[in-house]
Image (cartoon, rainbow, N blue to C red):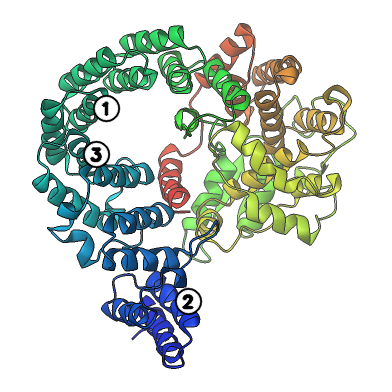
Amino acid sequence: MPEDDPALSAEEELALARLALAEGDLRHAADHVAAALVQAPTLPEVHETLARLAAAGGGDLDLFPLGHHAFVGAVVARAHLLAAAGRPAEGLDLLAAATGYAPAAEWAAVPWVTAPDLPERLDPERTARILMQICAAAPDPVPRRLRDPLRPYLTLARNAVTVHPAHPLLLGAASALARRLGEVALAVTWASRGVRAQPTKLGEVWLGYAYRSAGRTRDALAALERAVALDPDDLAVYADIAGTLADNGRLDEALTWTDRALAKDPSFDCAVHTAHRLRFQRDGDVAHLVALADFVRDHPDDTHEHGDLAECCRGRPWLGQVTPAGGPVLDALRQALAAEAGAPVAVRLDGLEPPSAMRTAAAAAPGLAVEVAAVADPDPREPRRATTRQLWRYEGTVAAPTLPSPSAEAAERIRQLAHPAWPHPPAAYDAAVALATLDLSDLLALLVHPPAAPATALGRVLAGQDPSLWVRCVQVWACLGLLHHRTDEPWAESTRRRTLLELVWGVEDWITEAALFALVTAAWVDPAVRPDVARAVAERLADVAAVARERRVPIAVSLAHLALATPDLDPATRALADSLIAGPAPDAPAGLLRRLWHRLTGLFRRH
């Protein structure tokens, strides 16, 4: 058998278990059987050895103890022993717990779980609770690749419904599982039967969800509204109705339902999350998302996690990802990377590109010939305001870092952390705490000496197709790391604020964007700094607009997107940002970048 076949490891564990059994060492035999179950939960030889062990130990359940940190293999082994001892309900409880812990494992794909007569030995309400436990642990819907390990539970549901055809709770729970596993017609049938047997709030909710999955929106809304009539105080159903209406483009109606829920309880988490998401969906004002982030921060003990904030930020410039850079030098770089080895590529620039762009092109494609025709005024080689942190020096049109390389530790730390996407700005801030112990000198050095991309799937894509995006990732995360530098210092006089502002007003560069994003992130996580950050963003964007009247500003559109992501920004600056974004089309190759982001998004989801 191949060395990486999990059954081989199971066979090794079983061999050790048999040796321990022969020596009468039941405890070690049990440990090896539990390990074999984890490797191959359906392998017949594992279950045969477990049966031998049970016989030798007189069915002693304590061979597989449960505790606060129980091994999942021991939990599953104990489940099988309980079923063999005539206690299948307890065994199913443990299998359901194992499924919640590791849903991709086939813990339940064993004959006793799918036996047609099993439900006859179970209380239907207990069966329903077990199915609900599986649903609580499963995504909705379950991805196709993860459905097979859960199908034995659906077989259990079918068998149970056959034995108890009019039990409303069982029918509803079975419907919920069927719907998650893509059996939508079956889900509608079961939920309908459950409501006919006994109309309940929960039954109507399950029916509404089933109809919604089947695309029967009108029926779904009717069922959910009946659920509200049965229990007007369950505000989660109000949020469900709002979400269903919004999914069908009926935003105004949806918001009337969130408003009704919030009128009853202004702090009800589902309604708050849904309302802010829908308001942002309606008008695009980031204030709704900032208010939602504030609510999440102020209510850390919500009953369950919500994905509304991440959903709204996903794929949006700076709210959920680095914006890819454009410009003629990067166009030439991408052309050089796509060209056959040794094929010459040259580019003549009408004006000077940001130093990070020029350095990235020179490092990634040493054979790329770049000629700068002229340097337009205002001179992009000069800081926009006086600074004590000049990171670049120029010889003609060639930029070089003024700082030495960062330490090996700093390079490795940023290599492990830097990423083109994040759920939302507060999540990026939280993740950047991993850089809190780096020296200021290292964080600044990373901005101009980005280490090579890591040898991961993501790193290989970035290095091979768009090295500029990796450089931007490093700069963004290094600036986020600056937010965690000397956090004991009050913001107004802090080193972190002063440093970031100097970077914002330094040489026109990608570092400007990264530093401004860090300031914007600070405003997201700390309401007290919002007026200061909004003022800084407004001043920097006004300066960009003034320079753009004289020459091209490569970072203008990106800074405008940053402005729109800024809490409490004044309306005039928002209008200015909108005008910059609506200006001449960016020169980034949109099709190429869209394909690259599609590929990267696949990597984000897999890792």
Residue type at numbered disc 1: Leu
Residue 132: name its quadrant: top left
| Percent coordinates x, y for residue 582 in the rendering | 49, 18
Q: Residue at x 32, y 63 (%)?
A: 107
Mark 2 vs 3, N-terminal side? 2
Reading the image, the residue beneath label 1 is 202
At numbered mark 3, what does the secondary structure look like: helix, strand or loop? helix
Q: Could you give the CA–CA distance between mark 3 and mark 1, rounded to whole angstroms?
A: 10 Å
Residue 218 seen by the camera = yes
Residue type at numbered disc 2: Asp
Q: Which mark is residue 292?
A: none
Mark 2 vs 1, N-terminal side? 2
Mark 3 vs 1, N-terminal side? 3
**How many other residues sit within 10 Å of disc 2, few (<14), some (14-19) or many (≥20)?**
some
Which one is in front, 495 or 350?
A: 495
At numbered mark 2, what does the secondary structure look like: helix, strand or loop? helix
Reading the image, the residue beneath label 3 is 173
Residue type at numbered disc 3: Ala
Residue 371 seen by the camera = no
Q: Residue at x 46, y 42 (%)?
A: 593
Q: Residue at x 17, y 23 (%)?
A: 199
| Percent coordinates x, y for residue 514 in the rendering | 68, 36
Reading the image, the residue beneath label 2 is 31
